[in-house]
Amino acid sequence: MSTAPSAQPAAASRIAIVTGASSGIGAATARQLAGAGYRVVLTARRKDRVEALAEEIRAAGGQATAYPLDVTDRAAVDEFASAFRTIGVLVNNAGGALGADPVASGDPDDWRRMYETNVIGTLNLTQALLPKLEASGDGTVVVVSSTAGHGTYEGGAGYVAAKHGEHVLAETLRLEIVGRPVRVIEIAPGMVKTEEFALTRFSGDAEKAAKVYQGVAEPLTADDVADTITWAVTRPSHVNIDLLVVRPRAQASNTKVHREG
Ligand code: 8X3
Protein backbone atom coordinates (compact mmCIF):
# COMPACT_ATOMS: atom_id res chain seq x y z
CA MET A 1 0.00 0.00 0.00
CA SER A 2 1.35 3.42 -0.94
CA THR A 3 2.07 5.80 1.89
CA ALA A 4 2.53 8.81 -0.39
CA PRO A 5 0.17 11.70 0.31
CA SER A 6 -2.60 11.83 -2.25
CA ALA A 7 -4.92 14.55 -3.47
CA GLN A 8 -8.39 14.61 -1.95
CA PRO A 9 -10.15 11.76 -3.74
CA ALA A 10 -13.44 13.54 -4.25
CA ALA A 11 -11.97 16.51 -6.17
CA ALA A 12 -13.66 15.56 -9.42
CA SER A 13 -17.14 16.36 -8.18
CA ARG A 14 -16.23 19.17 -5.83
CA ILE A 15 -16.97 22.85 -6.19
CA ALA A 16 -14.24 25.42 -5.57
CA ILE A 17 -15.28 29.07 -5.38
CA VAL A 18 -12.57 31.65 -6.06
CA THR A 19 -13.10 35.35 -5.36
CA GLY A 20 -11.19 38.03 -7.22
CA ALA A 21 -10.91 35.59 -10.11
CA SER A 22 -10.83 38.22 -12.86
CA SER A 23 -7.02 38.51 -12.90
CA GLY A 24 -3.76 37.76 -11.13
CA ILE A 25 -3.63 35.21 -8.32
CA GLY A 26 -7.39 34.55 -8.43
CA ALA A 27 -7.44 33.81 -12.15
CA ALA A 28 -4.35 31.60 -11.91
CA THR A 29 -5.87 29.74 -8.95
CA ALA A 30 -9.11 29.14 -10.83
CA ARG A 31 -7.14 27.69 -13.75
CA GLN A 32 -5.02 25.44 -11.51
CA LEU A 33 -7.91 24.18 -9.36
CA ALA A 34 -9.82 23.36 -12.55
CA GLY A 35 -6.73 21.50 -13.71
CA ALA A 36 -6.77 19.57 -10.42
CA GLY A 37 -10.33 18.45 -11.16
CA TYR A 38 -12.46 20.96 -9.28
CA ARG A 39 -15.60 22.52 -10.71
CA VAL A 40 -14.56 26.13 -10.28
CA VAL A 41 -16.89 29.06 -9.75
CA LEU A 42 -15.19 32.32 -10.66
CA THR A 43 -16.39 35.49 -8.98
CA ALA A 44 -15.30 39.10 -9.37
CA ARG A 45 -16.94 42.41 -10.05
CA ARG A 46 -15.93 42.40 -13.71
CA LYS A 47 -18.47 40.17 -15.46
CA ASP A 48 -16.77 40.13 -18.87
CA ARG A 49 -13.45 39.02 -17.36
CA VAL A 50 -14.78 36.12 -15.29
CA GLU A 51 -17.00 34.97 -18.14
CA ALA A 52 -14.05 34.97 -20.56
CA LEU A 53 -11.90 33.02 -18.10
CA ALA A 54 -14.65 30.48 -17.42
CA GLU A 55 -14.97 30.00 -21.17
CA GLU A 56 -11.19 29.55 -21.49
CA ILE A 57 -11.20 26.91 -18.74
CA ARG A 58 -14.11 25.06 -20.33
CA ALA A 59 -12.38 25.16 -23.72
CA ALA A 60 -9.37 23.51 -22.07
CA GLY A 61 -11.61 20.70 -20.78
CA GLY A 62 -12.23 22.01 -17.26
CA GLN A 63 -15.51 22.76 -15.51
CA ALA A 64 -16.06 26.43 -14.78
CA THR A 65 -18.86 28.94 -14.33
CA ALA A 66 -18.73 32.68 -13.78
CA TYR A 67 -20.73 34.73 -11.30
CA PRO A 68 -20.23 38.51 -11.12
CA LEU A 69 -20.02 39.47 -7.46
CA ASP A 70 -18.90 42.34 -5.25
CA VAL A 71 -17.66 40.66 -2.06
CA THR A 72 -18.51 43.75 0.00
CA ASP A 73 -22.22 43.52 -0.92
CA ARG A 74 -23.59 41.18 1.75
CA ALA A 75 -27.04 40.81 0.19
CA ALA A 76 -25.47 39.82 -3.14
CA VAL A 77 -23.11 37.40 -1.36
CA ASP A 78 -26.04 35.76 0.46
CA GLU A 79 -27.95 35.38 -2.78
CA PHE A 80 -24.88 33.87 -4.44
CA ALA A 81 -24.37 31.42 -1.55
CA SER A 82 -28.00 30.30 -1.70
CA ALA A 83 -27.29 28.74 -5.10
CA PHE A 84 -25.18 26.00 -3.47
CA ARG A 85 -26.13 23.09 -1.26
CA THR A 86 -22.55 22.10 -0.52
CA ILE A 87 -19.14 23.30 -1.67
CA GLY A 88 -15.67 21.86 -1.15
CA VAL A 89 -13.38 24.88 -1.28
CA LEU A 90 -13.65 28.63 -0.83
CA VAL A 91 -10.62 30.69 -1.86
CA ASN A 92 -10.90 34.20 -0.41
CA ASN A 93 -8.59 36.05 -2.74
CA ALA A 94 -10.43 39.31 -3.51
CA GLY A 95 -8.76 42.37 -2.04
CA GLY A 96 -5.78 44.57 -2.70
CA ALA A 97 -3.86 47.67 -1.72
CA LEU A 98 -4.72 51.34 -2.18
CA GLY A 99 -1.98 53.89 -1.69
CA ALA A 100 1.41 53.75 -0.01
CA ASP A 101 1.25 56.88 2.11
CA PRO A 102 2.65 57.27 5.59
CA VAL A 103 0.29 57.12 8.55
CA ALA A 104 0.56 60.91 8.89
CA SER A 105 -1.02 61.52 5.50
CA GLY A 106 -2.81 58.33 4.42
CA ASP A 107 -6.34 58.74 3.08
CA PRO A 108 -8.90 57.37 5.57
CA ASP A 109 -11.13 56.43 2.64
CA ASP A 110 -8.38 54.19 1.26
CA TRP A 111 -8.04 52.56 4.68
CA ARG A 112 -11.82 51.97 4.85
CA ARG A 113 -12.02 50.53 1.36
CA MET A 114 -9.09 48.19 2.02
CA TYR A 115 -10.72 46.97 5.22
CA GLU A 116 -14.00 46.47 3.36
CA THR A 117 -12.59 44.45 0.46
CA ASN A 118 -9.89 42.47 2.25
CA VAL A 119 -11.50 41.80 5.64
CA ILE A 120 -15.27 42.28 5.32
CA GLY A 121 -15.23 40.66 1.88
CA THR A 122 -13.54 37.59 3.35
CA LEU A 123 -15.92 37.68 6.32
CA ASN A 124 -18.99 37.89 4.05
CA LEU A 125 -18.05 34.94 1.87
CA THR A 126 -16.84 32.83 4.77
CA GLN A 127 -19.96 33.42 6.86
CA ALA A 128 -22.30 32.80 3.94
CA LEU A 129 -20.55 29.62 2.78
CA LEU A 130 -19.37 28.02 6.02
CA PRO A 131 -22.58 25.95 6.40
CA LYS A 132 -22.16 24.70 2.81
CA LEU A 133 -18.50 23.83 3.40
CA GLU A 134 -19.45 21.94 6.53
CA ALA A 135 -22.31 20.20 4.76
CA SER A 136 -19.81 18.77 2.28
CA GLY A 137 -18.25 16.82 5.14
CA ASP A 138 -14.80 17.95 3.99
CA GLY A 139 -14.52 21.68 3.38
CA THR A 140 -11.56 24.02 3.00
CA VAL A 141 -11.46 27.77 3.49
CA VAL A 142 -8.41 29.47 2.02
CA VAL A 143 -7.54 33.00 3.03
CA VAL A 144 -5.06 34.63 0.67
CA SER A 145 -3.55 37.18 3.02
CA SER A 146 -0.05 38.57 2.49
CA THR A 147 3.29 38.91 4.19
CA ALA A 148 1.79 42.33 4.99
CA GLY A 149 -0.42 40.38 7.41
CA HIS A 150 2.65 39.38 9.40
CA GLY A 151 4.86 42.46 9.58
CA THR A 152 4.72 46.09 8.67
CA TYR A 153 6.68 48.44 6.42
CA GLU A 154 6.81 52.20 5.92
CA GLY A 155 3.98 53.46 3.76
CA GLY A 156 2.07 50.23 4.14
CA ALA A 157 0.03 50.74 7.29
CA GLY A 158 -3.46 50.84 5.75
CA TYR A 159 -2.88 47.66 3.76
CA VAL A 160 -0.87 46.05 6.55
CA ALA A 161 -3.70 46.71 9.02
CA ALA A 162 -6.25 45.13 6.67
CA LYS A 163 -4.06 42.11 6.01
CA HIS A 164 -3.45 41.64 9.73
CA GLY A 165 -7.25 41.64 10.02
CA GLU A 166 -7.51 38.84 7.47
CA HIS A 167 -4.82 36.86 9.29
CA VAL A 168 -6.70 37.23 12.57
CA LEU A 169 -9.93 36.15 10.91
CA ALA A 170 -8.27 32.96 9.64
CA GLU A 171 -6.53 32.17 12.91
CA THR A 172 -9.62 32.77 15.02
CA LEU A 173 -11.93 30.81 12.71
CA ARG A 174 -9.58 27.82 12.93
CA LEU A 175 -9.86 27.90 16.71
CA GLU A 176 -13.62 28.31 16.67
CA ILE A 177 -14.49 25.48 14.28
CA VAL A 178 -11.98 22.86 15.37
CA GLY A 179 -13.71 19.48 15.45
CA ARG A 180 -15.89 20.35 12.47
CA PRO A 181 -14.94 19.05 8.99
CA VAL A 182 -13.54 22.31 7.62
CA ARG A 183 -9.89 23.28 7.27
CA VAL A 184 -8.72 26.89 7.42
CA ILE A 185 -5.61 27.57 5.35
CA GLU A 186 -3.83 30.91 5.13
CA ILE A 187 -1.49 31.60 2.24
CA ALA A 188 0.67 34.71 2.75
CA PRO A 189 2.47 35.78 -0.43
CA GLY A 190 5.26 38.34 -0.47
CA MET A 191 6.30 40.17 -3.63
CA VAL A 192 4.16 38.92 -6.51
CA LYS A 193 4.30 40.67 -9.87
CA THR A 194 0.81 40.67 -11.35
CA GLU A 195 -0.68 42.88 -14.03
CA GLU A 196 -2.80 44.88 -11.60
CA PHE A 197 -1.73 44.79 -7.92
CA ALA A 198 0.80 47.65 -7.98
CA LEU A 199 -1.05 49.59 -10.67
CA THR A 200 -4.20 49.61 -8.54
CA ARG A 201 -2.20 50.57 -5.48
CA PHE A 202 -0.80 53.62 -7.28
CA SER A 203 -4.05 54.61 -9.04
CA GLY A 204 -2.80 53.55 -12.47
CA ASP A 205 0.61 55.27 -12.23
CA ALA A 206 2.70 52.82 -14.28
CA GLU A 207 6.01 54.42 -13.32
CA LYS A 208 5.39 54.05 -9.58
CA ALA A 209 4.07 50.54 -10.11
CA ALA A 210 7.18 49.50 -12.06
CA LYS A 211 9.44 50.77 -9.25
CA VAL A 212 8.00 48.15 -6.88
CA TYR A 213 9.68 45.39 -8.90
CA GLN A 214 12.68 47.37 -10.21
CA GLY A 215 15.87 45.30 -10.26
CA VAL A 216 14.21 42.28 -8.63
CA ALA A 217 15.39 39.33 -10.70
CA GLU A 218 12.34 37.14 -10.30
CA PRO A 219 9.38 38.32 -8.28
CA LEU A 220 6.79 35.59 -7.70
CA THR A 221 4.17 35.17 -10.41
CA ALA A 222 0.44 34.61 -9.94
CA ASP A 223 1.05 31.02 -11.04
CA ASP A 224 3.64 30.50 -8.27
CA VAL A 225 1.06 31.49 -5.66
CA ALA A 226 -1.73 29.51 -7.33
CA ASP A 227 0.58 26.52 -7.18
CA THR A 228 1.01 26.85 -3.40
CA ILE A 229 -2.75 27.30 -2.94
CA THR A 230 -3.51 24.24 -5.06
CA TRP A 231 -0.87 22.21 -3.25
CA ALA A 232 -2.27 23.15 0.18
CA VAL A 233 -5.86 22.47 -0.85
CA THR A 234 -5.06 19.07 -2.36
CA ARG A 235 -3.32 17.66 0.74
CA PRO A 236 -5.25 14.83 2.37
CA SER A 237 -8.21 16.13 4.37
CA HIS A 238 -6.65 15.63 7.79
CA VAL A 239 -3.63 17.81 6.83
CA ASN A 240 -4.24 21.49 7.55
CA ILE A 241 -1.58 23.87 6.25
CA ASP A 242 -2.29 26.57 8.83
CA LEU A 243 -0.06 29.21 7.28
CA LEU A 244 2.20 29.18 4.28
CA VAL A 245 4.47 32.20 3.72
CA VAL A 246 5.85 32.37 0.20
CA ARG A 247 8.30 34.95 -1.12
CA PRO A 248 10.66 35.25 -4.06
CA ARG A 249 14.26 34.25 -3.27
CA ALA A 250 15.28 37.90 -3.71
CA GLN A 251 13.04 39.02 -0.83
CA ALA A 252 14.25 38.18 2.67
CA SER A 253 11.65 40.25 4.51
CA ASN A 254 9.05 42.92 3.81
CA THR A 255 11.81 45.51 3.88
CA LYS A 256 14.85 43.56 2.68
CA VAL A 257 14.78 43.02 -1.08
CA HIS A 258 17.79 42.34 -3.30
CA ARG A 259 17.72 44.59 -6.36
CA GLU A 260 20.22 44.39 -9.23
CA GLY A 261 21.57 47.29 -11.25
C1 8X3 B 1 1.63 42.13 -1.29
C2 8X3 B 1 2.91 42.20 -0.55
O1 8X3 B 1 4.83 43.73 0.12
O2 8X3 B 1 3.20 44.67 -1.39
O3 8X3 B 1 0.59 41.60 -0.55
O4 8X3 B 1 2.65 44.33 0.92
S1 8X3 B 1 3.38 43.81 -0.21
Image (cartoon, grey):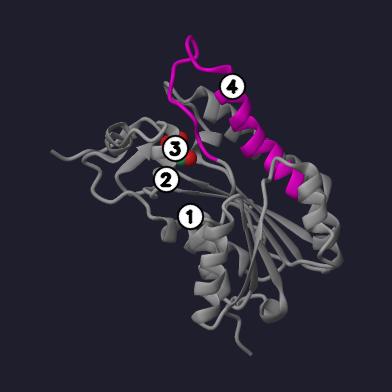
> In the picture, residue 256 is in which quadrant?
top left
Which numbered dot is residue 23? 1
Type of amino acid under label 1:
Ser
Q: Position of residue 193 (x, y in %)?
A: 36, 48
Q: Nearer the viewer, residue 212 or 247?
A: 212
Give the extent of the magenta segment.
Answer: 96-125
Secondary element at tag 1: loop
Which element type, helix, strand or loop, lies under badge 2?
loop
Residue for badge 4 = 109
| Front one among 97 and 88 | 97
* Residue 200: image tag: 3
Position of 6 compared to 23: left or right?
Answer: right
Q: Is residue 254 visible?
A: yes
Mark 3 to mark 1 CA distance (whole Å): 12 Å
Distance between the alpha carbons at the discs numbered 4 and 3 = 15 Å
Q: Quadrant of the N terminus?
A: bottom right
